[in-house]
Amino acid sequence: MTLSVAEYAKHFDMALHLQSSTEKDIREHAQGARDANVAACYTNSYWTPVVAEVLSGSDVHVGTAISFPYGCTSTAMKFAEIDEGLELGATAVDMVLNIGALRDKNYALVEKELDGLVERCQGKAISKLIYEVCFLSDEEIATLTKMCSDAGIDYVKTATGSEGFPTESQVKIMRDNITNPATKLKVSGVPRTFAMPASLWLIEKYGVSLIGTRSAAKLVKQYSDYVDAGLTV
C-alpha cells in the first residue's frame, strides 16, 4: 500500500491536552495542524474558539474533548459540554465513556450517552467515543464496540492516551465487532519510538482510519521525507 503525503496526513488527529498550555501554545498547535493538513486538531473545550479561529477556511476539523480524560462527569454535564463546544465552533467531538458504568453493566446509561452524542452531532460534527481498553475485558470491548456501531457513532477510539495503550489484540477485537460500516476505528497510543512505521502498520493491517497523537505534524513530515527518498513500496 502506498499513501500520498496528503492521504497519510488525513489519517491523523492532532491533540494537545496539557494543563499548562497557554493561548500561544494552542495557537501554535493549531497552526501546526493546519500546516500539516491533518484530519482534526483537538484541545479541551476552553480553547475551542481559538482553534476554530486558527483553522478557519481550512478543511481541518475543530475537535473538542468531552469529559476528558476520565469520562465520569454526569450525563447532563457531558451533554452541556457537547452543546457548548458545537456553539463555539467544534466540528468533531470526542466523548469519554464512563468505564465504571460499563463494567457495572449499566447499559442504560451507556446507551443514553451514546444516543445523546449522536443526536447532538448529527449534521454538525463527527462523533467519536473514547473508551480506555486497558481497563476492559475482551468481552466488554466487543460489547461496547457493537453498542457504538448500533448507535451510529462515527468513530470508536481505543484510549485517551493518558492511561494504558491498546494492544494489537484489542485493536483487532474493536475492528471485528464494528457492525455498522459507517463506524470507523481510531487508535490513540502509538509507540513513542518507530511511530511512523507503526502507524502505517495499523492503517494497512487493521484498516485504522484515524490515529490520535500530539506528534501528528512531526509524523507527516517524517512520511514526506520517506516518500521523497523513494522508500515507499
Image: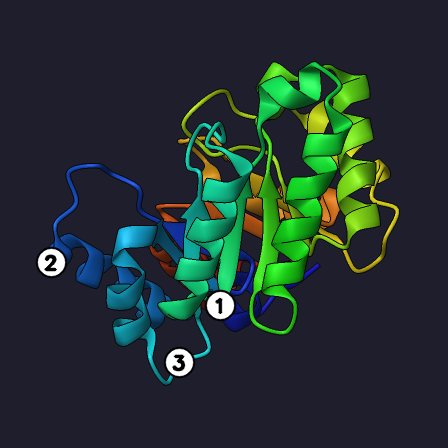
Say few, some or many: other residues with alpha carbon within 10 Å of mark 2 (under 14 / 14 to 19 / 20 or more). Answer: few
First-in-chain label (2 vs 3): 2
Q: CA distance from mark 2 to mark 3?
A: 20 Å
Q: Type of residue at label 2?
A: Lys
Label 2 element class: helix
Q: Please name whichever residue, 195 or 31, is drawn nearer the observer in this view of the structure.
A: 31
- Going by the image, does 171 lie left or right of 57? right
Residue hosting label 3 = 58
* Image spot of residue 7 (x, y percent): 57, 68
Give above or below for 144 relative to 116.
above
Residue hosting label 2 = 24
Q: CA distance from mark 1 to mark 2?
A: 22 Å
Residue shown at 40%/53% (left/top)?
Answer: 14
User: Which image quarter: residue 161?
Assistant: top left
Residue shown at 53%/65% (left/top)?
Answer: 10
In front: mark 1 or mark 2?
A: 1
Residue hosting label 1 = 91
Label 1 element class: loop
Give above or below for 213 relative to 87.
above
Does the rendering let one see residue 207?
A: yes
Q: Type of residue at label 3?
A: Ser
Label 3 element class: loop
Q: CA distance from mark 3 to mark 1?
A: 12 Å
Does the rendering let one see residue 197?
A: no
* Image spot of residue 189 (x, y percent): 49, 33
Badge 1 vs badge 2, beta-carbon distance below 8 Å: no
- Going by the image, does 147 lie left or right of 109? right
